[in-house]
Amino acid sequence: MIDSKFETLLAVADLRNFTRAAEALSLTQPAVSHHISQLEKAYGEQLFVRKKNGLMLTKEGEILVKYARRIKALDAQMRAEIADAKRDLNKIRVGVTHTSESNLMIEVLARYSNENPNISITVITDTIKNLYTMLENFEIDIAVVDGKNTNLNFNALMLDTDYLVCVMSNNNPLSRHSLVTLAELKRERLILRSSSSATRSLFEATLEGIDDSIDAFDVTMEVDNIATIKDLIRKELGVSILPKSACMDELRKGKITALPIENLSMIRETNIIYHKTFSHTDVLQNITKIYQETAKKYIIGQKTS
């Protein structure tokens, strides 16, 4: 059980007021003040300072709050795992990247949910960095990320191998080619993902590997939402570099064209990342099986369209 003083600390940090924290915790205001004083004495640091708009955490207080949240999350996870050991899994929280949100993954999770109506699924979309933090804090159960697992505290199950392609309107003259050269790409208006995205990082790193630079390209827009980028492409407002998996539905329906780029091999893994303590690996295997079956249908659809 989490120490009540940490519960008090989190309430004061969130509400920025001793009285409101006391009301939320069903404690007296002196009891709340005493808890904070005990923590300050134990760690030898002042945790809050008074400002006009309420209590503010000191730098030391921010550190303590960060770990208190982790302790609370670990406590919740421990209780959940103990409960899960007594019954079947009934809820799973899945973190996905913007790329995974745009590819087959959401459909796969929906199919899994239909086949397992006793399990509810919550999907959270965020950056890879934030998803790893959520996993560390037990705010999500699994994460579907682009690239290899970067944290030794987690296990990884490879879901797929993906690669980046040049995506364009069907009316673009380049769409009649079998591939796009770098010289041709440099003459196009590029709509790219934000610089913090894994897609953009892989593209730029691959360019650097052949002594080229993103500065040599006409990057006219940076958009983080992949669906918006694809919509702009269909409206012939530019071309983009995207994971092929994020374009499967549009390619199957013949709405856009995706071509490889000459001399650029931009391959990466898609992995399911999960805590080593996550005991429901049968769920992961089932999700992987559904993913493979769904991907196969899309590939067949592209060949017959």
Image: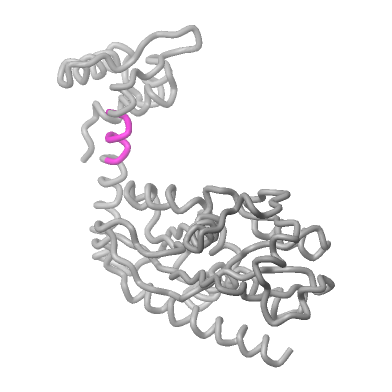
* Magenta part, dominant SS: helix
Q: Residue furthest left?
A: 42
Question: Which image quadrant is residue 184 in?
Answer: bottom right
Considering the image in quadrants, where does the N terminus appear? Answer: top left
Q: Is residue 75 above or below residue 288?
A: above
Q: Judge from the rendering whether residue 87 lies leftward or rightward of residue 304; answer left or right.
A: left
Q: Could you say where residue 302 lies in the image, as x and y percent from the top left?
A: 67, 86
Q: Viewed as shown, does residue 229 lie left or right of 107? A: right
Image color mode: one colour
87 to 194, vertically: above or below: below
Nearer to me, 172 or 27: 172
The structure residue drawn at horizontal position 52% and vertical position 48%, both measured from the top left corner, is: 196
Q: Is residue 278 visible in this depiction of the protein?
A: yes
Which residues are drawn in magenta? 64-70
Who is closer to the viewer here, 277 or 172? 172
Q: Residue at x 29, y 51 (%)?
A: 77
Residue 278 appears at what percent x and percent y? Answer: 28, 63
Residue at (31, 44) in percent of width and height: 73
Membership of 67 in magenta stretch: yes
